[in-house]
Structure formats: C-alpha cells, structure tokens
Image (cartoon, rainbow, N blue to C red):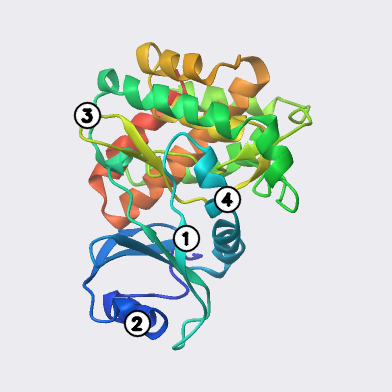
Amino acid sequence: MPQPEWVAEESVDASRAADLIAAQFPELRGAAVQPFAEGFDNTVFVVAGKWAFRFPRRQVAIPGVEREIAMLPLLAPLLPLPVPVPELVGTPAVGYPWPFFGARLLPGRELADADLPDVDRTPAAAAAGRFLRVLHAPALAARFGSGLPVDPMRRASPTVRAPVARERLDRLTARGTWADDGSVEDLLSQGERLTQGPPASPVLVHGDLHVRHVLVDGDGDAVGVIDWGDIALADPCVDLALAFSAFAPGGAREAFMQSYGHGVGGDQELRARVLAVSLAAALADYADTDGRPALLAESLAGLRRAST
C-alpha cells in the first residue's frame, strides 16, 4: 500500500528548526521555538512568540514556497484580510535541502479548529466573500499572473477531482467513519457529466482555500488567509469551493455570495461543489488517520454542506 501523501520527506522538529533559524538569523538565536501546526506540505513553528516559520515537508511543495516568497510581499497590501508576508527567508543549510521562511504570526485560529456552529459563521462568510471579490479581480490576474501555472492540480475539473474524492471516501467508509446517504455520490456523478471545460480568462486564486486556511477570531470573524503554496491562475470555482464546504445554505452562504458580488451558479457552482467534496474528503482522511477529531468533525460536516 502506498504511503499517504502527507507523509514527510523531510522532518523538522523544534530542535532542528532552532538550529536552522539560528544559523541564518542570529538575532533569533536562543529564542523559544514552539511547534504550532502541521499540514500536508509544511511544518510550522512559532519563534520568539511573534514569528511563524514554515518548513516544507515534501519536495512537491517547493515551487509553491518559492512563489509565496516572491509574491506575497507584493500581494498582501492589496488584499482586505492579512496574509503571511515572508520577511525572514532561509536558504538550504545544515543538511536541510529547501528554502523556508518566517512571517509575522497572524492572530486567530483555523476555522477548522474554532468549533463554530453554522449559525455563527455569517461574519466569516461575508469577510471571505469580500476577500475573494478582491483577489479574483481581473486587474490582479493581469498584474501577478505572468509565469503562474494555470490550474496545475486540475481542481476545476470534476472528471479529475471526483474519482480522487471517491478513493478517499471509500477509505473513510471502510473505516466506519463515513456513510453517504447518496447525496455526495449524486453530486460527484453530476460533475463527471460535465463535458466542457471551465471558461477562459482565469483569475488569480489562492488555490487551496479550505477551513484550515481561513483564520477567525473569538467572535467568529475572518482575520487572515494562510498557506498560499498553491497560488495560481484558475477558474474562480477553485476558491469558491470554500463557500460550499465551510458555510451552510442560508444565512452564512448567502452572506458569502452577497459579499462576493458575482453570480455563481450552473456549471461553475457544480465544479465548486465537487472540489469542496474532494477537499473535505482529503482533510477527513488525513484527520481520521492522524488522530485529529476536531478537524475530522469539521471535514465530515463539510461533506454534508457541499452536497446541500
């Protein structure tokens, strides 16, 4: 059986992170280094209580890290929510083969960990919609799109994403974690019947926008968007998946769409829903395997939201 895609190719613990940081940033030598977060592609440590240092775990993530380092300092001032700005950029050293960076620690916690009931998600939904309205503006694609890949993961293609989602859902079902009432499979099947690709004129997208990458404060309002390693050009549906996985029909999802300000329906909505299922299934599989009950509960809820 192949290893899960989130298995690290390079492991960085707090001791190794401290050595790498001290070697290149003497001003932080001796500062406290605390484990903070871990995902498929990066391990994050908080240093001196104010810096978030991200260390890639897999080779496949390196082009995205390099794009973050190059683009986020230019993009950040134009966006209505804070994003990480790489200020302390490290290069391969001390046996570590890849670039890494430190950005000012953003306040808030992942929406995935906030345990917000659906009825309390309207502020975050409205803020996320406003954020994407700015990010998806044609002017940003014209300014930053040169050299960016165009939907490299084919996330706007249900014929690609639906089979991947099924594989993950089958694993969850085999473990007794998920039981579909038929609505998710119906959605995936509808998506696979789309024969035409998404329209031309792609926009600038975050590329991996889900509940782990939106930060919220204690009042449930969105206060940041993190992890930009998949920034690309693509159909807006690639980011609009968030509306269907994170926000239930009615108040919160309606607030998202009103703030976004562009009609979303038809094939574009179907593509976004299929991607929402694919991302939620990936997170659920990861959470179930890695022992993350809060993320698992949120991801399973995301599957249900996406199919309604």
Where is residue 162 shown, x and y percent of the image?
59, 36
On the rendered image, what quadrant is the C terminus found in? top left
- The type of residue carrying mark 3 is Asp
Residue under the point 34% across and 30% down:
301
Label 3 or label 1, whichever comes before in sequence order: 1
Callout 2: SS: helix
Q: Is residue 212 above or below residue 17?
A: above
Q: Quadrant of residue 46?
A: bottom left
Q: Say which label, 1 or 2, has the lower sequence index.
A: 2
The CA distance from mark 3 to mark 4 is 29 Å
Question: Is tag 4's residue or tag 2's residue first in the polypeptide sequence?
Answer: 2
The answer, for residue 41, to whether it is visible in the render is no
Q: CA distance from mark 1 to mark 4?
A: 10 Å
Three-letter code for the amino acid on which mark 1 is drawn: Pro
> Residue 273's x, y, as percent?
54, 27
Please provide percent x and percent y for residue 190: 62, 22
Q: Is residue 72 left or right of residue 147?
A: left
Q: Is residue 84 above or below residue 26?
A: above
306 left or right of 189 in image: left
Work out whether mark 1 precedes mark 4 in sequence or the reverse, and give the earlier one: 4
Question: Circle 3 sits on which residue?
Answer: 219
Q: Secondary structure at mark 3?
A: loop
The residue to which callout 2 is attached is 26
Q: Quadrant of residue 297?
A: top left
Element type where label 4 sits in the image: helix
Q: Which residue is mark 4?
A: 74
Q: Which mark is residue 86?
A: 1
Please name whichever residue, 154 or 211, is drawn nearer the observer in this view of the structure. Answer: 211
